[in-house]
Amino acid sequence: MAWRSWARCCYPEDFSRLEEFSCYRDPQFDHIALLSAPADVLLARIAARTGNPYGKHPAERAQILRDLAAVEPLLRATATIEIDATAPLPEVVRRLEAVTILPW
C-alpha cells in the first residue's frame, strides 16, 4: 500500500504504530483519510531517510513532485478527512483513531 511507503519515509521510528492501525479493515470504509504534507516537507523527509534510496536523485525528486501534483487532488476529492501529516505522529494517530471505531 502507498501509505506504508509514506509512513516508513516520514515516521520510520513509529511505523509499527501506524501499521497496527491499518490491520483492521472495515469493509464499509466509513472514512477515507488523506495524510497530506507540503511538497517541501515531503522532499525533506525523503532526503533525510536512510532506508530507501529512491528520491535522492534530482530526476526522481522531479517525478515525485509531478506525481504529487497529479495525484493529490484526486485523493483529496475522494477523502472524507484530511489530516495534516506535518503534525507530530501521536496527533496524526489520534486524528485517525478519532474517526475509527477499532474492535479492541
Image: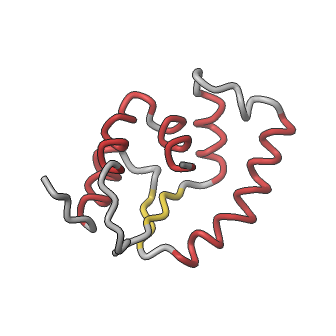
Seen from the viewer's position, the closer of residues 21 and 82 is: 21
Q: How many marks?
A: 0
Residue furthest toward the left?
104
Q: Is residue 19 left or right of residue 78?
A: left
Q: Residue at x 58, y 27 (%)?
A: 49
Give the color scheme: rainbow, by chain, secondary structure or one colour: secondary structure
Residue furthest toward the front?
27
Q: Is residue 82 left or right of residue 1?
A: left
Residue 37, percent from left and from top: 55, 54
Q: Residue at x 43, y 65 (%)?
A: 33
Residue 43, percent from left and from top: 66, 41
Report which quarter residue 24 is drawn in: bottom left
Residue furthest toward the right?
59
In the figure, 39 relative to 13: above or below? below
Residue 102, percent from left and from top: 20, 59
Q: Residue at x 78, y 41 (%)?
A: 61
Seen from the viewer's position, the closer of residues 63 and 3 is: 3
Residue 44, percent from left and from top: 62, 37
